[in-house]
Image: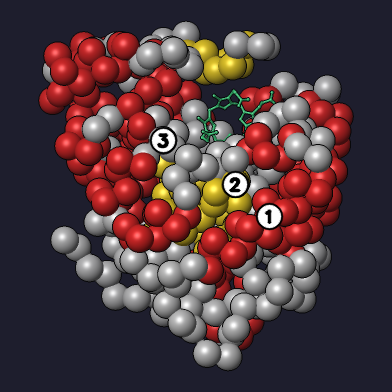
């Protein structure tokens, strides 16, 4: 098993541990007054101010317009008061740049005009130069950092910006099927018929992802999250074969000390495998696994992120507040004294029928959580 030296906060340009924002402290396991909180898919259709911008720009045009990206990225900062911003982009921009020809069909979600179904299709993929083909994302990162420069969290410190990508497995799931699928039968069939060919696709996606994340980091993202939405299609042994190698290569490519988070959905059975990732990789847990169960598997110091059921935000405000307080309590259980090891979030993306007040109630209740005993 690989071991990484614990990240040193001093590697953050100019920052000492004391002026690290709460989210970045928690990523490093440093004690915090309360768990930081952000919300997966916090910029999106549940916000009227987002829908107002989308009324004028389709989703991909929005992703390619840096000043508009900055505007929607900071909307949840201003509305909810979360402790971190996540770049507004999509995991499918990479396979689009690779030649998949992505479009978003109203009501149907993403669609690739040129899916990759077998090894023969690999020769049709383009060689990506990330500056040429995805440079608009790096410009957007810079615009987000500029927009965040005049905002502060309730700790008086700047709001960090999270960059992201999909894991090659999850990106391939959409590229192979040509869009979302009920059963991912083309992807799974390929994985049994010609694993070597599928590995080639996964490694091609990983190559682009490594350059893409390096570009995001150079442009200013301060942490990286990898989304593995379709992890749960695999058992542990197939996960070790089909997901871990390219995911590890991407994680290893990131600069030492940069916070890394892996969100893997539907993965109670994969936690022991995920726990073999380097100790400083935070694991974002979906809502089906109680945090205490995850904690028992990953030990007292690994940072866990999550994991309120997104549907819980559809309930009445007092119920949301109770659930948020319970989440803070659960997040503290089994954590080594003097450490923090929980980032409050949902267990998957916020549902677009959530009312803004329901999201606000969740974040406000986490922010009101009593001080963790930071003195120990
Ligand atoms: O606020 C944020 O979290 C940042 C932006 C973000 C988006 N997509 C914007 C988006 C992030 C981090 C993603 C990740 C993403 N995209 C994932 C992984 C996380 C997850 O939810 O499982 C996946 C699987 C995708 C692919 C994707 N993009 C799908 C399947 C869809 C259509 C269905 C849907 O959820 O809307 C999208 C579109 C998309 N990406 C929207 C947004 C805000 C909705 C577009 C719109 O405005 O109509």
Percent coordinates x, y for residue 351 in the rendering: 67, 31
Percent coordinates x, y for residue 139 in the rendering: 62, 46
Vertical order, 326 against 132 (above or below): below
Where ligand 1 lies, by image quadrant? top right
Residue at the disc numbered 3: 266
Q: Is residue 329 visible?
A: yes
Residue at the disc numbered 1: 324
Q: Could you say whether the residue bearing mark 2 is in a helix, strand or loop?
A: strand
Percent coordinates x, y for residue 229 in the rendering: 44, 34
Task: Out of 82 and 75, give the one closest to the viewer.
Answer: 82
Residue at the far bottom: name it: 375
Q: Residues within 10 Å of mark 2 (few under 14, many from 20)?
A: many
Residue at point 74% right, 65% down? Answer: 367
Question: 281 left or right of 367?
Answer: left
Residue at point 36% right, 46% down? Answer: 210
Disc nearer the start of the sequence (1/3): 3
Marks 1,3: beta carbons within 8 A:
no
Q: Which mark is residue 349?
A: none
Asked where in the image residue 3 lies, by quadrant, the reply is bottom left
Q: CA distance from mark 2 to mark 1?
A: 8 Å
Marks 2,3: beta carbons within 8 A:
no
Residue at the disc numbered 2: 308
Q: CA distance from mark 2 to mark 3?
A: 14 Å
């Amino acid at each position: 098993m690989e071991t990484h030296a614990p990240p040193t906060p001093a590697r953050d340009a100019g920052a000492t541990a004391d002026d690290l924002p709460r989210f970045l402290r928690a990523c490093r396991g440093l004690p915090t007054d309360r768990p930081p909180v952000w919300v997966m898919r916090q910029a999106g259709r549940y916000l009227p101010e987002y829908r107002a911008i989308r009324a004028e720009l389709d989703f991909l045009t929005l992703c390619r317009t840096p000043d508009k990206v900055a505007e929607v990225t900071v909307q949840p900062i201003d509305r909810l008061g979360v402790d971190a911003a996540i770049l507004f982009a999509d995991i499918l921009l990479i396979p689009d740049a690779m030649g998949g020809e992505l479009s978003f069909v109203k009501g149907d979600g993403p669609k690739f005009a040129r899916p990759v179904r077998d090894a023969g299709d690999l020769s049709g993929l383009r060689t990506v130069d990330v500056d040429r083909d995805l440079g608009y994302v790096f410009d957007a990162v810079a615009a987000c950092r500029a927009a965040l420069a005049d905002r502060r969290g309730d700790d008086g410190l700047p709001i960090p910006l999270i960059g992201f990508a999909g894991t090659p497995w999850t990106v391939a799931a959409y590229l192979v099927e040509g869009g979302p699928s009920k059963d991912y039968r083309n992807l799974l069939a390929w994985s049994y018929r010609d694993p070597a060919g599928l590995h080639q696709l996964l490694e091609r996606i990983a190559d682009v992802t490594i350059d893409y994340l390096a570009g995001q980091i150079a442009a200013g993202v301060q942490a990286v999250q990898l989304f593995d939405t379709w992890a749960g299609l695999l058992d542990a042994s197939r996960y070790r074969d089909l997901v871990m190698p390219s995911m590890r290569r991407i994680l290893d490519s990131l600069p030492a000390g940069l916070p890394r988070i892996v969100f893997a959905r539907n993965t109670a059975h994969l936690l022991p495998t995920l726990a073999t990732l380097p100790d400083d990789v935070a694991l974002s847990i979906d809502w089906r696994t109680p945090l205490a169960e995850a904690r028992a598997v990953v030990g007292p110091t690994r940072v866990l992120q999550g994991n309120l059921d997104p549907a819980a935000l559809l309930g009445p405000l007092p119920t949301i507040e109770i659930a948020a307080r319970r989440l803070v309590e659960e997040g503290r259980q089994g954590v080594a004294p003097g450490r923090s090891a929980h980032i409050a979030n949902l267990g998957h993306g916020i549902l677009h029928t959530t009312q803004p007040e329901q999201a606000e109630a969740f974040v406000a209740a986490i922010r009101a959580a009593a001080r963790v005993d930071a003195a120990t």
